[in-house]
Amino acid sequence: MTLRATITGLVLVSVLQIGILAFEYLGAVYPLWSDVSVRLKTVPVDPRSLFRGNYAQLRYEISRLPMSLYQGSRSLRENERVYVTLEKGDDGIYSARGILLEPPLQGRFVRGRVKNQWRSKDEIRITYGIEAFFAPKREALALERGLRSGAFAEVGLASNGKAALKSVHVE
């Protein structure tokens, strides 16, 4: 193998690795660049983690939904991708209207994964990848206290339903 072939191979591998990292990063921030933004009601959680840094753990009203909202015929599996259709309330907060296995053709929706750890027949638990808000220590602690009195999250939505957390506001 020649020196030129070795250098070309190393350059191609490096470009591939940088491309993969850039793709992952862009996929995570793409919803923040979209013009679509929704407000979701949060519910309090008491997190503790020494390894993840300073953050406030978030849970949403749309994180636990009644099975009656599911509009499919087969049972849902753990970690299955679902699409939760959203409806804007009079207060500007969005709430769940339905649970689908395919993205709807119109309207606002958020993409999530089924996490039924308790296997309740009447309730479904869904995570959206927006359950932690990282902030400086004092801000995270203040936010954690504020979440107990009520708060909402500003969430960016991409056209495919992927969500990204923009900000959290205490009422």
Image (cartoon, helix red, strand yellow):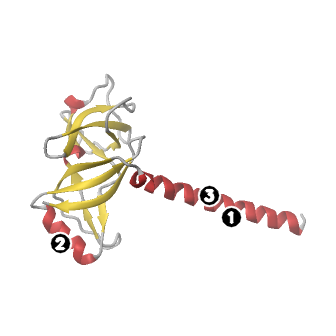
Residue lying at 32% horizontally and 56% vertically, measured from the top left: 165
Where disc 1 sits, the SS reads: helix
Residue 57, horizontal then vertical, whole percent: 25, 61
Dot 3 and dot 1 residues touching (CB under 8 Å):
no
In the picture, measured across the screen, residue 96 lies left or right of residue 4, that is left
The residue at the far left in this view is: 149
3 or 1: tag closer to the N-terminus: 1
Rate crowding at label 3 as few (under 14), some (14 to 19) or many (20 or more) other CA atoms within 10 Å.
Answer: few
Name the amino acid type tagged 2.
Ala
Rate crowding at label 2 as few (under 14), some (14 to 19) or many (20 or more) other CA atoms within 10 Å.
Answer: few
Identify whether 109 is placed above or below 72: below
Dot 3 and dot 2 residues touching (CB under 8 Å):
no
Residue 105, horizontal then vertical, whole percent: 38, 29
Rate crowding at label 1 as few (under 14), some (14 to 19) or many (20 or more) other CA atoms within 10 Å.
Answer: few
Residue 159 marker: none
The residue at the far bottom in this view is: 138
3 or 2: tag closer to the N-terminus: 3
Residue at numbered disc 2: 142
Name the amino acid type tagged 3.
Gly
Residue at numbered disc 1: 14
Where disc 3 sits, the SS reads: helix
Residue lying at 28% horizontally and 42% vertically, measured from the top left: 116
Residue 19 marker: 3
Quarter of the image for the N terminus: give it: bottom right
Observer-nearest of 103 and 123: 103
